[in-house]
Amino acid sequence: MDNKAFAEKLKVRTKEFSINIIRLSASLPDTTERQVVRNQITKSGTRAGASYREAANRTGGKAF
């Protein structure tokens, strides 16, 4: 697998992971404690994809 194919595959995987995290957090009950956990799960779970895209855009995609 070349770098371009790997980069595209990683982009898709991080997006799917983020979507799954959002679905998981949406399925949690609405209690005060769960809201805190839900917010943290959503923030940390979607950060990987956001960080990857930010790094790829910063370098023009050449490093990925």
Image (cartoon, grey):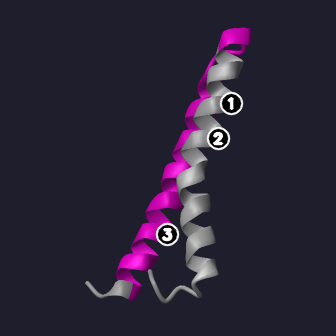
Q: CA distance from mark 2 to mark 1?
A: 6 Å
| Nearer-the-camera pick, 55 or 50 | 55
Which residue is identified by label 2?
Answer: 43
Residue kind at label 2, given as amino acid type: Lys
- Residue at 52%, 44% (x, y): give it: 20
| Residues at marks 2 and 1 touching, judged by CB atoms closer than 8 Å | yes
- Residue 17 appears at what percent x and percent y? 49, 51
Q: Does residue 24 appear in this view?
A: yes
Residue kind at label 3, given as amino acid type: Lys
Q: Nearer the viewer, mark 2 or mark 3?
A: 2
Q: Is residue 6 magenta?
A: yes
Residue 60 higher or lower than 34, as above or below: below
Residue 59 placement: quadrant: bottom right
- Residue 52 appears at what percent x and percent y? 54, 66
Which badge, 3 or 1, comes first in the chain's sequence? 3
Which residue is identified by label 3?
Answer: 11
Secondary structure under the numbered disc 1 in the rendered image:
helix
Task: Point out the stretch of residues depicted in magenta.
Answer: 4-33
Q: CA distance from mark 2 to mark 3?
A: 18 Å
Secondary structure under the numbered disc 2 in the rendered image:
helix
Q: Is residue 35 left or right of residue 49?
A: right
Name the dominant secondary structure of the magenta segment: helix
Q: CA distance from mark 3 to mark 1?
A: 23 Å
- Residue at 35%, 85% (x, y): give it: 3
Which residue is identified by label 1?
Answer: 39
